[in-house]
Amino acid sequence: MIIAIASGKGGTGKTTVAAALVKVWDRPVQAVDLDVEEPNLALYLKPELTGREISMMEIPLADQDKCTACGACSEICQFKAISVLGEYILTFPEMCHGCGGCLAVCPEGALSPDTRELGEVLWGWAGEIDFLMGRLRVGEAMSPPLMRAAKKRLDSSRDVIIDAPPGVSCPAVNAVKDTDVIVLVTEPTPFGFYDLKLAREAFTPIGAPMGVVINRTGIGDKGVYDYCHATGLPILLEIPYDRQVAEAYSRGEVIVDALPEYQNMFLELSSRIRDLADRRMKEARYA
Protein backbone atom coordinates (compact mmCIF):
# COMPACT_ATOMS: atom_id res chain seq x y z
CA MET A 1 0.00 0.00 0.00
CA ILE A 2 1.28 3.46 -0.92
CA ILE A 3 0.04 6.47 1.03
CA ALA A 4 0.75 10.07 0.04
CA ILE A 5 0.68 12.82 2.66
CA ALA A 6 -0.10 15.95 0.66
CA SER A 7 -1.45 19.45 1.13
CA GLY A 8 -2.64 22.29 -1.02
CA LYS A 9 -0.25 24.71 0.67
CA GLY A 10 2.98 24.68 2.64
CA GLY A 11 3.18 25.08 6.38
CA THR A 12 0.11 23.04 7.27
CA GLY A 13 2.00 20.30 9.13
CA LYS A 14 2.37 17.76 6.32
CA THR A 15 5.81 16.56 7.42
CA THR A 16 4.70 16.50 11.06
CA VAL A 17 1.90 14.11 10.11
CA ALA A 18 4.10 11.99 7.81
CA ALA A 19 6.84 11.55 10.42
CA ALA A 20 4.37 10.64 13.19
CA LEU A 21 2.49 8.22 10.96
CA VAL A 22 5.71 6.45 9.98
CA LYS A 23 6.68 6.12 13.64
CA VAL A 24 3.44 4.42 14.71
CA TRP A 25 3.01 2.27 11.58
CA ASP A 26 2.93 -1.31 12.85
CA ARG A 27 3.94 -3.04 9.62
CA PRO A 28 7.22 -2.87 7.65
CA VAL A 29 7.29 0.63 6.19
CA GLN A 30 9.34 2.79 3.87
CA ALA A 31 9.37 6.55 4.51
CA VAL A 32 9.87 8.55 1.32
CA ASP A 33 10.51 12.29 1.09
CA LEU A 34 9.50 13.45 -2.40
CA ASP A 35 9.46 17.14 -1.45
CA VAL A 36 12.74 17.22 -3.36
CA GLU A 37 13.05 21.01 -3.44
CA GLU A 38 12.99 21.23 0.35
CA PRO A 39 13.31 17.72 1.83
CA ASN A 40 13.07 17.82 5.62
CA LEU A 41 11.66 14.46 6.71
CA ALA A 42 15.22 13.35 7.50
CA LEU A 43 15.49 16.11 10.11
CA TYR A 44 12.83 14.30 12.16
CA LEU A 45 13.50 10.62 11.42
CA LYS A 46 17.28 11.12 11.56
CA PRO A 47 18.16 8.15 9.31
CA GLU A 48 21.65 6.78 8.82
CA LEU A 49 22.18 7.25 5.08
CA THR A 50 23.86 4.27 3.45
CA GLY A 51 23.53 4.97 -0.28
CA ARG A 52 23.53 7.81 -2.79
CA GLU A 53 22.97 8.02 -6.53
CA ILE A 54 23.36 11.07 -8.76
CA SER A 55 20.33 11.49 -11.01
CA MET A 56 20.94 12.68 -14.57
CA MET A 57 18.58 13.70 -17.37
CA GLU A 58 19.12 13.38 -21.10
CA ILE A 59 19.42 16.63 -23.05
CA PRO A 60 20.36 17.30 -26.70
CA LEU A 61 23.87 18.31 -27.79
CA ALA A 62 23.97 20.13 -31.15
CA ASP A 63 26.56 19.70 -33.91
CA GLN A 64 26.49 22.87 -36.00
CA ASP A 65 28.46 21.27 -38.83
CA LYS A 66 25.77 18.66 -39.46
CA CYS A 67 22.73 20.91 -38.92
CA THR A 68 20.90 22.05 -42.08
CA ALA A 69 18.58 24.40 -40.11
CA CYS A 70 15.47 22.47 -41.22
CA GLY A 71 13.74 23.38 -37.92
CA ALA A 72 12.22 19.93 -37.24
CA CYS A 73 13.68 19.87 -33.72
CA SER A 74 12.27 23.26 -32.70
CA GLU A 75 8.86 22.42 -34.16
CA ILE A 76 8.45 19.29 -32.02
CA CYS A 77 9.71 20.85 -28.77
CA GLN A 78 6.72 22.12 -26.74
CA PHE A 79 8.97 23.67 -24.13
CA LYS A 80 11.03 25.96 -26.40
CA ALA A 81 14.20 24.20 -25.27
CA ILE A 82 15.67 24.23 -28.78
CA SER A 83 15.48 26.87 -31.51
CA VAL A 84 16.90 27.50 -34.96
CA LEU A 85 17.92 31.09 -35.65
CA GLY A 86 19.03 31.55 -39.23
CA GLU A 87 21.56 28.79 -39.80
CA TYR A 88 22.30 28.24 -36.13
CA ILE A 89 20.76 25.82 -33.69
CA LEU A 90 20.47 26.89 -30.05
CA THR A 91 19.68 24.64 -27.08
CA PHE A 92 18.44 25.72 -23.63
CA PRO A 93 19.21 22.76 -21.34
CA GLU A 94 17.47 24.24 -18.30
CA MET A 95 14.16 24.24 -20.22
CA CYS A 96 14.53 20.68 -21.60
CA HIS A 97 12.13 18.01 -20.24
CA GLY A 98 14.24 15.16 -21.62
CA CYS A 99 11.58 13.66 -23.90
CA GLY A 100 14.09 12.95 -26.68
CA GLY A 101 11.72 14.13 -29.42
CA CYS A 102 14.29 16.42 -31.04
CA LEU A 103 16.83 13.58 -31.20
CA ALA A 104 14.26 11.34 -32.88
CA VAL A 105 13.17 13.77 -35.60
CA CYS A 106 16.54 15.26 -36.61
CA PRO A 107 17.09 13.96 -40.18
CA GLU A 108 20.80 14.84 -40.27
CA GLY A 109 21.92 13.32 -36.97
CA ALA A 110 22.97 16.79 -35.83
CA LEU A 111 21.75 16.14 -32.29
CA SER A 112 23.29 13.62 -29.91
CA PRO A 113 22.38 12.79 -26.32
CA ASP A 114 24.12 14.65 -23.52
CA THR A 115 23.19 14.79 -19.83
CA ARG A 116 22.73 17.30 -17.06
CA GLU A 117 22.64 16.65 -13.31
CA LEU A 118 19.23 16.92 -11.64
CA GLY A 119 20.14 16.10 -8.08
CA GLU A 120 20.58 13.02 -5.96
CA VAL A 121 18.62 10.14 -4.52
CA LEU A 122 19.66 9.04 -1.02
CA TRP A 123 18.58 6.09 1.11
CA GLY A 124 19.26 4.52 4.47
CA TRP A 125 17.62 3.39 7.69
CA ALA A 126 16.04 5.05 10.71
CA GLY A 127 15.90 2.05 13.04
CA GLU A 128 13.59 -0.42 11.28
CA ILE A 129 12.22 2.27 8.97
CA ASP A 130 13.49 2.10 5.39
CA PHE A 131 14.21 5.70 4.36
CA LEU A 132 14.39 7.22 0.86
CA MET A 133 14.61 10.82 -0.33
CA GLY A 134 15.34 12.96 -3.37
CA ARG A 135 17.31 16.19 -3.17
CA LEU A 136 17.22 18.59 -6.12
CA ARG A 137 20.45 20.30 -7.22
CA VAL A 138 20.58 23.96 -6.23
CA GLY A 139 19.46 25.98 -9.25
CA GLU A 140 17.65 23.06 -10.90
CA ALA A 141 13.94 23.57 -11.59
CA MET A 142 12.97 20.21 -13.09
CA SER A 143 11.87 18.19 -10.06
CA PRO A 144 9.48 15.54 -11.57
CA PRO A 145 12.28 13.53 -13.30
CA LEU A 146 14.18 13.34 -10.00
CA MET A 147 11.01 12.25 -8.21
CA ARG A 148 10.52 9.50 -10.79
CA ALA A 149 14.12 8.37 -10.20
CA ALA A 150 13.43 8.17 -6.47
CA LYS A 151 10.18 6.27 -7.04
CA LYS A 152 12.09 3.54 -8.89
CA ARG A 153 13.51 2.61 -5.47
CA LEU A 154 10.15 2.14 -3.74
CA ASP A 155 10.13 -1.15 -1.82
CA SER A 156 7.07 -3.15 -2.93
CA SER A 157 7.50 -5.52 0.04
CA ARG A 158 6.70 -2.69 2.48
CA ASP A 159 3.96 -0.15 2.96
CA VAL A 160 5.16 3.20 1.64
CA ILE A 161 4.40 6.59 3.20
CA ILE A 162 5.29 9.53 0.93
CA ASP A 163 5.85 13.08 2.17
CA ALA A 164 4.70 14.92 -0.97
CA PRO A 165 5.55 18.49 -2.06
CA PRO A 166 3.03 21.19 -1.14
CA GLY A 167 0.73 22.72 -3.75
CA VAL A 168 -1.11 21.23 -6.71
CA SER A 169 1.36 21.72 -9.59
CA CYS A 170 3.32 19.05 -11.49
CA PRO A 171 5.61 18.02 -8.59
CA ALA A 172 2.66 17.43 -6.24
CA VAL A 173 0.69 15.50 -8.88
CA ASN A 174 3.76 13.36 -9.67
CA ALA A 175 4.15 12.54 -5.99
CA VAL A 176 0.55 11.43 -5.36
CA LYS A 177 -0.19 9.57 -8.59
CA ASP A 178 -0.03 5.76 -8.39
CA THR A 179 -0.84 5.89 -4.67
CA ASP A 180 -3.59 3.94 -2.91
CA VAL A 181 -4.67 6.68 -0.47
CA ILE A 182 -4.10 10.45 -0.44
CA VAL A 183 -4.15 12.19 2.93
CA LEU A 184 -4.70 15.94 2.64
CA VAL A 185 -3.34 17.96 5.56
CA THR A 186 -4.97 21.33 6.05
CA GLU A 187 -5.81 23.89 8.71
CA PRO A 188 -9.21 25.42 9.55
CA THR A 189 -8.50 28.85 8.12
CA PRO A 190 -9.66 30.59 4.92
CA PHE A 191 -6.22 29.89 3.37
CA GLY A 192 -6.44 26.23 4.35
CA PHE A 193 -9.99 25.99 3.01
CA TYR A 194 -9.07 27.55 -0.35
CA ASP A 195 -6.06 25.30 -0.89
CA LEU A 196 -7.94 22.18 0.26
CA LYS A 197 -10.46 22.83 -2.51
CA LEU A 198 -7.65 23.17 -5.05
CA ALA A 199 -6.02 19.95 -3.85
CA ARG A 200 -9.26 17.95 -4.01
CA GLU A 201 -9.99 19.20 -7.53
CA ALA A 202 -6.42 18.53 -8.73
CA PHE A 203 -6.12 15.05 -7.24
CA THR A 204 -9.65 13.70 -7.88
CA PRO A 205 -8.80 12.54 -11.46
CA ILE A 206 -6.09 10.28 -9.99
CA GLY A 207 -8.85 8.12 -8.56
CA ALA A 208 -7.31 7.35 -5.18
CA PRO A 209 -9.53 7.77 -2.09
CA MET A 210 -8.80 10.94 -0.15
CA GLY A 211 -9.16 11.85 3.51
CA VAL A 212 -8.39 14.98 5.49
CA VAL A 213 -6.24 15.69 8.54
CA ILE A 214 -7.12 19.03 10.10
CA ASN A 215 -4.17 20.48 11.97
CA ARG A 216 -4.35 23.24 14.59
CA THR A 217 -8.03 22.80 15.34
CA GLY A 218 -9.49 25.45 17.59
CA ILE A 219 -8.38 28.34 15.39
CA GLY A 220 -9.98 29.76 12.24
CA ASP A 221 -13.55 29.00 11.21
CA LYS A 222 -15.85 26.16 10.05
CA GLY A 223 -15.21 26.49 6.32
CA VAL A 224 -13.02 23.37 6.06
CA TYR A 225 -15.51 21.28 8.06
CA ASP A 226 -18.48 22.44 5.97
CA TYR A 227 -16.57 21.68 2.76
CA CYS A 228 -15.64 18.17 3.93
CA HIS A 229 -19.23 17.41 4.89
CA ALA A 230 -20.59 18.80 1.61
CA THR A 231 -18.16 16.88 -0.59
CA GLY A 232 -17.97 13.65 1.39
CA LEU A 233 -14.28 14.03 2.24
CA PRO A 234 -13.80 12.02 5.45
CA ILE A 235 -12.03 13.80 8.30
CA LEU A 236 -9.48 11.23 9.45
CA LEU A 237 -7.88 13.15 12.30
CA GLU A 238 -8.03 16.50 14.10
CA ILE A 239 -4.83 17.72 15.74
CA PRO A 240 -5.47 20.42 18.35
CA TYR A 241 -3.70 23.76 18.32
CA ASP A 242 -1.10 22.89 20.95
CA ARG A 243 2.00 24.89 21.83
CA GLN A 244 3.77 21.65 22.84
CA VAL A 245 3.44 20.34 19.25
CA ALA A 246 5.07 23.49 17.87
CA GLU A 247 7.86 23.27 20.42
CA ALA A 248 8.54 19.60 19.56
CA TYR A 249 8.56 20.48 15.86
CA SER A 250 11.04 23.31 16.43
CA ARG A 251 13.36 20.90 18.25
CA GLY A 252 13.23 18.42 15.34
CA GLU A 253 11.28 15.85 17.34
CA VAL A 254 8.50 13.59 16.08
CA ILE A 255 5.26 14.47 17.81
CA VAL A 256 4.50 10.90 18.98
CA ASP A 257 7.98 10.62 20.54
CA ALA A 258 7.87 13.99 22.29
CA LEU A 259 4.21 13.71 23.33
CA PRO A 260 3.24 10.04 23.90
CA GLU A 261 -0.38 11.04 24.49
CA TYR A 262 -0.61 11.59 20.70
CA GLN A 263 0.31 7.99 19.84
CA ASN A 264 -3.22 6.61 20.04
CA MET A 265 -4.42 9.48 17.87
CA PHE A 266 -2.00 8.54 15.08
CA LEU A 267 -2.64 4.82 15.52
CA GLU A 268 -6.30 5.62 14.87
CA LEU A 269 -5.24 7.59 11.79
CA SER A 270 -3.30 4.60 10.45
CA SER A 271 -6.37 2.40 10.96
CA ARG A 272 -8.63 4.83 9.10
CA ILE A 273 -6.18 5.05 6.21
CA ARG A 274 -6.20 1.26 5.88
CA ASP A 275 -9.99 1.29 5.93
CA LEU A 276 -9.97 3.71 2.97
CA ALA A 277 -7.56 1.46 1.06
CA ASP A 278 -9.59 -1.68 1.86
CA ARG A 279 -12.82 -0.01 0.77
CA ARG A 280 -11.22 0.94 -2.55
CA MET A 281 -10.02 -2.62 -3.12
CA LYS A 282 -13.52 -4.00 -2.43
CA GLU A 283 -15.12 -1.48 -4.79
CA ALA A 284 -12.61 -2.39 -7.51
CA ARG A 285 -13.30 -6.09 -6.94
CA TYR A 286 -17.08 -5.70 -7.43
CA ALA A 287 -16.93 -3.06 -10.16
Image (spheres, rainbow, N blue to C red):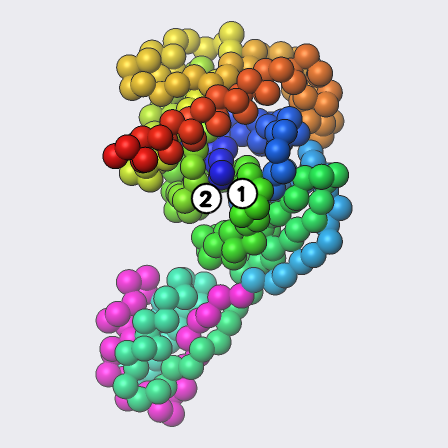
Of 127 and 92, the residue lying toward us? 127
In this picture, is 30 found above or below 267?
Answer: below
In this picture, is 172 found above or below 194?
Answer: below
Give the residue drawn at x 51%, y 51%. Answer: 151
**2 and 1 marks in contact (CB < 8 Å):** yes
Task: Say whether residue 72 is left or right of residue 198.
Answer: left
Disc 2 marks which residue? 175
Instruction: Identify the element where label 2 is drawn.
Output: helix
Of 275 and 81, the residue lying toward us? 275
In the image, is residue 57 part of the stretch drawn in magenta?
Answer: yes
Give the residue drawn at x 48%, y 26%. Answer: 273
Disc 1 marks which residue? 35
Q: How crowded is mark 1: few (under 14 residues within 10 Å), some or many (20 or more)?
A: many
- Percent across and percent down for residue 6 are 47, 33
Task: Say whether residue 127 is left or right of residue 273.
Answer: right
Give the residue drawn at x 31%, y 35%. Answer: 284
Q: What stretch is highlighted in magenta?
A: 56-80
